[in-house]
Amino acid sequence: MAKLRLLLAMGKPRILMLMCGLALAGAVLSPDFLSPAFPETRLGRLLQSPPRIWSLAHAVGAALVVGLLWVGTAIIAEIADRSVNAIGDPGRPAPDCRMRPTVALRWALGAQALAFLLVLAEGSRQAMTLALIGAGLGNAYSLPPLRFRGLGTAAHLIVGGGATLAITGGLIAQTGATEVGLLSAGALGVLAAAVSLIKEFQEPDADRAAGVRTLPILVGIRAAVYINMAAVVGAYLLALFLLIHTIGVHEKVIAVFFLPLGANLSVLHRLAADRSPETARRAYDHAVIIYMGVTALYVGAQAIY
């Protein structure tokens, strides 16, 4: 039990829940979600399940696959970044030696292998392609020779790409991706990249000592904050355009939609004024909550209307 708790800590439970939620969000964005016309599948035919039940099962399955892939890549990142964490966050399981790297690596590879087995059991070629891309990018984030973690902006693009892949995976798990769904995944992916960027403001000294070239180190903290603001505004405007395109002009929905944008910009404004590591930690926590809220609002509005 203690080992499982350590593995869960290495898998970062809050982000794990977020990634699974993004896969479910992608499923809800599909016009075929819970449709009585959901096409018959191999296991659905074998189990004689109603179409709506199997649509829901595919959504949950997509979330499980995304979750397993995330846990695997997060544990691998924890192992690869233990020298950085030993400076900035020595309480993490890998730096303080509560979990041997070889043991953690076996669990990480096992989680990823189980994800691929689930895709093989019921997924499509598109789903397998997405899973391979997601695992490849996730592992390359921290592992050499690519190690995107140390390449500044590229690292955040990988994080945003992971969110985009998670949402697209939920779409694919239904009957396929739609144009609006893919654009929605892209907008939410940009917001995820912007959230991940805030985390790089927490430990610039540790990153600099480890030779990690994050965006705040490359361009300075203030410039990095303004780049983040521009990305957030662009992503919100794209999401708002897609929302209006899909559900029409609903003044109350649009007004509510601007609330998380204002909250997000307020968080970034405070970070620009006070660039201390503690402020950056609070900003990251708040940005994650705002991201969850805007995702639920966007997907909920699409589903209701």
Image (cartoon, helix red, strand yellow):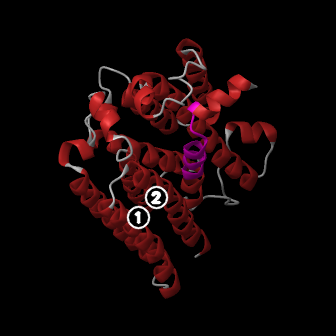
Q: Position of residue 247 (x, y in %)?
A: 50, 77
The residue under label 2 is 287
The residue under label 1 is 267
Q: Position of residue 41 (x, y in %)?
A: 67, 42
Above or below residue 194? Residue 120 is above
User: In the shown orientation, is residue 152 left or right of residue 57?
Assistant: left
Element class at badge 1: helix
Q: Amino acid at mark 2?
A: Ala
Q: Main secondary structure of the magenta part?
A: helix
Q: Residue at x 40, y 43 (%)?
A: 159
Mark 1 burial class by Cα count in 10 Å: few <14, some 14-19, many 20+: many
The residue furthest bottom is 251
The residue furthest right is 48
Q: Residue at x 55, y 69 (%)?
A: 297
Above or below residue 105? Residue 269 is below
Q: Contact, CB < 8 Å: mark 2 with mark 1?
A: yes
Q: Is residue 136 visible?
A: no
Q: Quadrant of the C terminus?
A: bottom right
